[in-house]
Image (tube, rainbow, N blue to C red):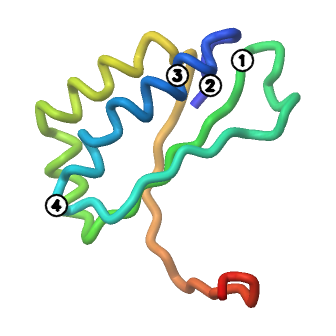
Amino acid sequence: MEIHPGREREFEETWLKVGDAVTGNPGNLAQWLLRGEAGEKEAEGSVYYIVSDWTDEPSFRAFESSEAHVRHRELLHPYRGAGSMMTMNMVYALRGAGAG
């Protein structure tokens, strides 16, 4: 998602504050906020990626249509310039040697 220029810090702080709306859902396994490299869409603001992992798609879809999700989106919306969403299924996960 693209965040309005100069609003990145506020967005990140708000994302952290409202994250329990997602991670508190029993179907959610984890959620990550990733920021694109410096310079990516710099003139238009910063690009962020939100990745969340769910036990299954029905749990995600139930959350997506819930009142908690609507409130979550309303709090993040003022920072957002544009965005899109896609769902994916993990095919493989390989643990690196540095992971311990």
**Spot occupied by residue 73 in the image (x, y as percentages of width and height):** 32, 26
Give the side of residue 4 with respect to residue 85, left or right.
right
Crowding at mark 1 (Cα within 10 Å: few <14, some 14-19, many 20+):
many
Give the side of residue 73 with respect to residue 84, left or right.
left
Give the side of residue 13 with respect to residue 36, left or right.
left
Amino acid type of the residue that numbered disc 4 sits on in the rendered structure: Pro
Secondary structure at numbered mark 3: helix
- Position of residue 24 relative to residue 43, above or below, is below
Crowding at mark 4 (Cα within 10 Å: few <14, some 14-19, many 20+):
few
Tell me if label 4 and label 1 are in contact, CB under 8 Å: no
Secondary structure at numbered mark 4: loop
Q: Which of marks 1 and 2 is nearer the N terminus?
A: 2
* Residue topped by disc 1: 45
Q: Which of marks 4 and 1 is nearer the N terminus?
A: 4
**Gap in Å between the C-alphas at discs 4 and 1?**
33 Å
Q: Nearer the observer, disc 3 or disc 1?
A: 3
Amino acid type of the residue that numbered disc 3 sits on in the rendered structure: Phe
**Spot occupied by residue 56 in the image (x, y as percentages of width and height):** 25, 70
* Residue topped by disc 4: 26
Of the 4 image quadrants, the one containing the C terminus is bottom right
Secondary structure at numbered mark 2: strand
